[in-house]
Amino acid sequence: MFEIALRSLRSRRLTVVLTIATIALATLMLLGVDRVRNETRTSFANTVSGTDLIVGARTGSIQLLLYSVFRVGNATNNIDWHSYEKLAKDPRVAWTIPVSLGDSHHGYPVLGTSHDYFRYLRYGDDQPLKMQSGHEFSHLHDVVLGANIARRLHYQLGQKLVLTHGSGDGALTEHADQPFTVTGILAPTGTPVDDTLHISLDGLTAIHQGWESGSASLLATTGALSADQDRAVPPPDSITAFYVGLKSRTGLFGVQRAINQFRGEPLMAILPGVALSELWQLLKVAEQALQVLSWFVLLVGLLGMMTALLVGLNERRREMAILRSVGARPWQLFALVVGETACLLVGGIAIGGALLQGALAIAGPLLRDHMTLLITPGWPTASEWLLMGCTLLAGLVVSIVPAWRAYRLSLSDGLHVAA
Amino acid sequence: MLIELRDLHFKWPGNPRDTLCIPQFSLSAEEKLFLHGPSGSGKSTLLALLAGIQTPDSGQLAVLGQDLAKLSAPQRDHFRANHLGYVFQQFNLLPYLSVRQNVLLGCQFSKLRRQRAAGLAGSPEKQALALLAQLELGDLADRPARALSVGQQQRVAVARALIGAPELLIADEPTSALDEARRDAFVSLLFACAEQQRTAVVLVSHDPRLAEGFDRSLNLSELNTASQVDHV
Ligand SMILES: Nc1ncnc2c1ncn2[C@@H]1O[C@H](COP(=O)(O)OP(=O)(O)OP(=O)(O)O)[C@@H](O)[C@H]1O
Ligand SMILES: [Mg+2]
């Protein structure tokens, strides 16, 4: 019986191939959307970990998250250096990472920070930052590159580069007088760190000396400031935001309240996990739309399969009558149709899964470069097995329609079938 | 008696009148019956009843002593697989199977016929080849069925109907697609094979010239009281 099914399928090669292709593409879509969705969500949730609070000037929590973590948009206000120093000294605080943004390099954000950035910042599953090569900045004009920047701009250790004042389209003036030297390149993290250039706060202050009026001063353009790598630089006036790690998470809300009610200036502390999930809620609509779309593609695929089977059935009434004449029971013809459909489905789903792996192998590097999304080919996840199972099940349910028709036809035709 | 039929009434669903109304009919084992009659007289309908595809509305229909009406539909299918070979008018074969596979289809659904085939020739496979050889198709066994001429296809159908030595072979106008020369050759080959394994034959045809060589020839419209009413 199984061999009959296989040979019968082989004799209808064109329809069969097209049907399998339809199912394969629908499966590819379904699995692909699911994979991208899950990886996006994970990589999203993994951008910051181990940080208890993020502090910035008072604004929306999502906005603060966007500029302090994702380097998207600008801070409305900065935090006064003295406020930062005061808050960092709170006995409940274990560590802080100051973050100063604003400059750029070829469109990539430049981030001024302290050595604590490399010590305390965590991402993913509590992973610390790792140097791929070189070491942290130690001099005024040292820069540590995120993994993507080094790869995309082909920068190597020891190479000199010039930062641009400001960011975005209007950023044209360069800090050409004070070039920076690449001293370190970070290992990839799959977070915005990969797209960031890190310099010391002092370095940031140094390149802006004489820039108070908004353009380079005579002092800056003559190059007098670039001469001394280790000259003393005053502390910055302000920073953009800072990350906070607490000694104990029990004090979390107390510290948050203290910061929100800080006297010196209007500040705000957010819990990164909470803010991330708020942001995710906003993005979820698009994600869900994509998911619904992929289910519709599957539905269309299955309906196409049903049409092909139903159309084929009329041409196969002869075949059914022959099988009946040698003693096949109507339910065996029902099973034959369901079995054939199962073959089509399993074939289509397997090919769809394989296509996904191929697509990921090809598109993986692209996604990594352009979306900071790390998706690698790999054995299907539990949720993907579930999706494939659902596809198979849905397909079998759909196949009941032509199978039932085969059953009815074989009963009413008996052995009488007009040739 | 191979077939015993008494006071049989059969009406197709949706038809106002009985199609078949047969007071008495019987067929003995190994008998070769030629059944003819005008179109619409119910020949194919009678064959469907004998094959257990349809069941009589009333009356008795026993094949091999078994009252078919007492069997469930799956049991009748099994009964057919075990004891009956069927040859259609045309398009008898599954075109995507080889000739040999088409023949083996005859015992695919019957363990009994596989055993009998093994008893006769050693294995179903061997009997299939023996029958094909006897029907002058020996060198075509591994051809795809669709590559055969109509006459060859009809002979393959005979091999399929006879494999595993069923008690009865039913053929509904098996020669209508053949020319005269091949028609006679077909019938004599059919007889030779059927006699060899003692299979009874009921062959339906419009063509009275075919009747030669049969044990008995029967006009269904004489047997069927319903069709006489039908033709008034
Ligand atoms: N599946 C069916 N459903 C309803 N009525 C049927 C069916 N098959 C046959 N009939 C009717 O039963 C009657 C006898 O048909 P049948 O096919 O048995 O005749 P026949 O003797 O085989 O004719 P022919 O020589 O043309 O094959 C006809 O009136 C036909 O319309
Ligand atoms: Mg007929």
Image (tube, helix red, strand yellow):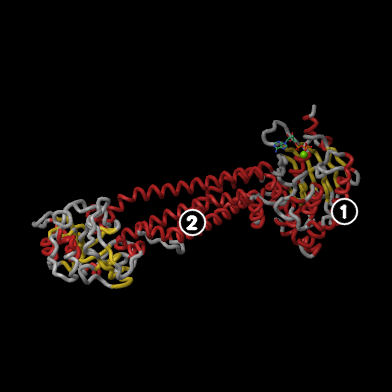
Callout 1 crowding tier (Cα within 10 Å): few <14, some 14–19, many ≥20: few
Q: For the residue marked with disc 1, what is the amino acid?
A: Ala
Quarter of the N terminus of chain A within the rendering: bottom right
Residue B139 location (% of width, % of height)? 81, 58
Distance between mark 1 and mark 2 Cα atoms: 55 Å
Pointer 1 indicates a residue of which chain?
A: B
Quadrant hosting residue B8: top right
Secondary structure under tag 2 reads helix
Ligand 1, image quadrant it occupies? top right
Residue corresponding to mark 1: B192
Residue A51 in sight here: yes
Secondary structure under tag 1 reads helix
Residue A41 location (% of width, % of height)? 34, 57
Quadrant hosting residue B135: bottom right
Residue corresponding to mark 2: A389
Residue A292 lies left or right of residue B193; in this view the side is left
Callout 2 crowding tier (Cα within 10 Å): few <14, some 14–19, many ≥20: some
Q: For the residue marked with disc 2, what is the amino acid?
A: Gly
Q: Residue furthest left?
A: A263
Quarter of the C terminus of chain A within the rendering: top right
> Is B33 placed above or below A388 here?
above
Pointer 2 indicates a residue of which chain?
A: A
Residue A258 in sight here: no
Residue A145 location (% of width, % of height)? 29, 65
